[in-house]
Image (cartoon, rainbow, N blue to C red):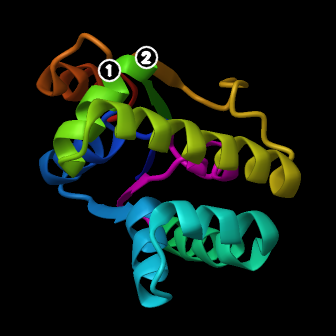
Amino acid sequence: MIIVISGPSGSGKTTVAKILSERLKLRFVSAGQLFREMAASLGKDIIEMNKSAEKKFDIDKLIDEKILDEAKKGNVIIESHIAGWLLSGIADYTIYLWANIEERAKRISIRDKISYEEALIKIMEREQSHYFRFWKYYGIDLLDLTPFDMVINTSNIDINRIVNIILAYIGKNTSV
């Protein structure tokens, strides 16, 4: 089984994907973590790495190849901003999590121990980079959610409820 969880920063995709991987006993692979590890190995932060990726497609391409390799192995939950588009037709389930920017900034400020204002600026910078890169290199319109089986607004929903909604959906469509 291949389950993809996509969505913008702060939408809850990593938390939900980790819980699902534990509950379903599937491997967990995070494109964001792979990207952060690559950035750290180059001595860059996420914003700097995104700016580098805008100029050099091979950064994203390397991450995407790793994600595709992991998907081919099966029994995995993949968390990624764009895996829902990249693995459309390969993944068994593609789920998009969304939350309003204010809620996402609040979550990121708590997670990263930064001010709300700083989180808001980081979100806007990252999303601008993502929209630019993903359209330029893949022709992906991040506003087109048609590749997804399910879209959930996580702004006002408890994480456990989100997980249960996804498990109920998967359970209706498989023998999980």
Tell me where the magenta segment starts and ends, as one range.
74-93
Front residue of this view, candidates 102 and 134:
102
Q: CA distance from mark 2 to mark 1?
A: 6 Å
Is 69 one of the magenta-colored residues? no
At 13% from the left edge and 46% from the top edge, which residue is drawn? 23
Q: Secondary structure at mark 2?
A: loop
Judged left or right of residue 140, residue 68 is: left
Q: Residues within 10 Å of mark 1 (few under 14, many from 20)?
A: some
Say which amino acid is labelled 2.
Asn
Q: Are marks 2 and 1 in contact (CB under 8 Å)?
A: yes
Front residue of this view, candidates 15 and 39:
39
x%, y% of residue 125? Answer: 58, 44
Q: Disc 1 marks which residue?
A: 103
x%, y% of residue 89? Answer: 68, 45
Relative to 20, residue 144 above or below: above
> Residue 176, can we see it?
no
